[in-house]
Image (cartoon, rainbow, N blue to C red):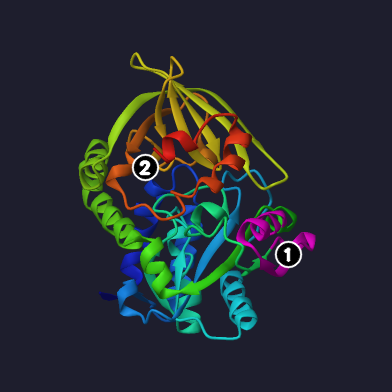
Amino acid sequence: MRRRLTIDDVEPAVRGGSVFACGGGGWADHGRMLGREAMAAGSPELVSIDELADDAWIATAAAIGAPAGTTQWEMRGSDYVRAVALLQEALGEPLAGLIIGQNGMSSTLNGWLPAATLGLAVVDAVGDIRAHPTGDMGSLGLAGSPEPMIQTAAGGHRASNSYIELVARGGTAKVSPILRAASDMSGGFIASCRNPIRAGYVAGHAALGGISRALALGEAILEAESQGGAAVVDAICAITGGTILARGRVVSKQVRYTPEAFDIGTIRLEGEGRGCTLHVMNEYMAADDQDGTRIATYPDVITTLSPMGEPVSVGCVEEGAELLLFHIAKPLIPLSASVRDPSVYPVVERALGIPIAPYALA
């Protein structure tokens, strides 16, 4: 499968990616900016992993930071290009393509601009079909590996002299926190390129077809919009197999930014006879009903929608707002090796104070 990405793919990628963003995954306007710049640089090509030789080098294009908009950040399209260029220089060999660590409001498009600029393929594979808080959760099962890897970062708030470039080598779990610290120091959001691996490994460990799924979902959303919000919600549920778990009003939002560049806390909804609490670590990682019973847990897709069917990120949730809680159970989505890696969960469980691994690994 080869598909030349065009300007007509930008909005579907943003719309579909926003559902898989699970309350995080960047910003929609940032995604549109990346898409427009990619098309100006030369339309990149979306390819399936089997189009590439098994020994071809593939790396992950990603953004690191807290997507709730609680910090002063600046990230330019050129920062994504620079991060990939730094990794190629450190690797000493050319990359053949880029995957993304996760879908999201902008992260679905993280690889498009550097691919178009540097002549690489956008590989239709993701480290995680949905957005997640840590780099290890999109590392294709490499979090516990002692194999030294390369991770780079570029970006920062220029006006406060916070621009940073970084090349780090070491075990994935040891290096990932360094890039997150750099994200905080740069203003809260930074471009990265990490973990060069062979295409054969990607084929066996990534969530394949993740970008195509976001594009198809986005196309369905755009097609349904003229019929109103209920039709959009119905279209999202129909194409994904997801359901609406709850509808209600936001009665509490307690989310704080941490020095590790995470937004952590809870959001509580009440309405229609069923309340629920959403647990946030950049993204929605779990939901409990009014009795404290778990009703959704990562890697399930957990997303808040407006009554018009528009995904609402954590940063845009306001007390008093009416929201729908959308859910896709994990058997309905492709799962990468990262999801099955027990080592990625302790940091999330400590931050949230709730169990995640027993549900995710079941």
Disc 2 packing (10 Å; few <14; some 14–19; many ≥20): some
Q: Magenta region: which residues?
A: 156-181
- Residue type beneath disc 2: Glu
Callout 1: helix, strand or loop?
helix
Q: Which residue is drawn at 57% across and 50% down?
A: 134
- To which quarter of the image does residue 256 belong? top right
Front residue of this view, candidates 167 and 252: 167
Label 2 close to label 1 by CB (< 8 Å)? no
Q: Position of residue 164 (x, y in %)?
A: 73, 66
**Vertical side of 237 occupied by 147: above or below:** below
Q: Is residue 5 visible?
A: no
Q: Is 288 included in the stretch rendered in magenta? A: no
Image quarter hosting the N terminus: bottom left
Q: Name the residue under label 2.
A: 310
Count of numbered badges drawn on the protein: 2
Q: In the image, is 98 to the left or to the right of 306? A: right
Q: Can residue 198 be seen in this view?
A: yes
Q: Name the residue under label 1.
A: 158
Q: In the image, is 89 to the left or to the right of 99? A: right
How far is disc 2 from disc 1 in space, using C-alphas?
32 Å
Q: Which residue is drawn at 61% across and 76% down?
A: 87
Front residue of this view, candidates 139 and 320: 139
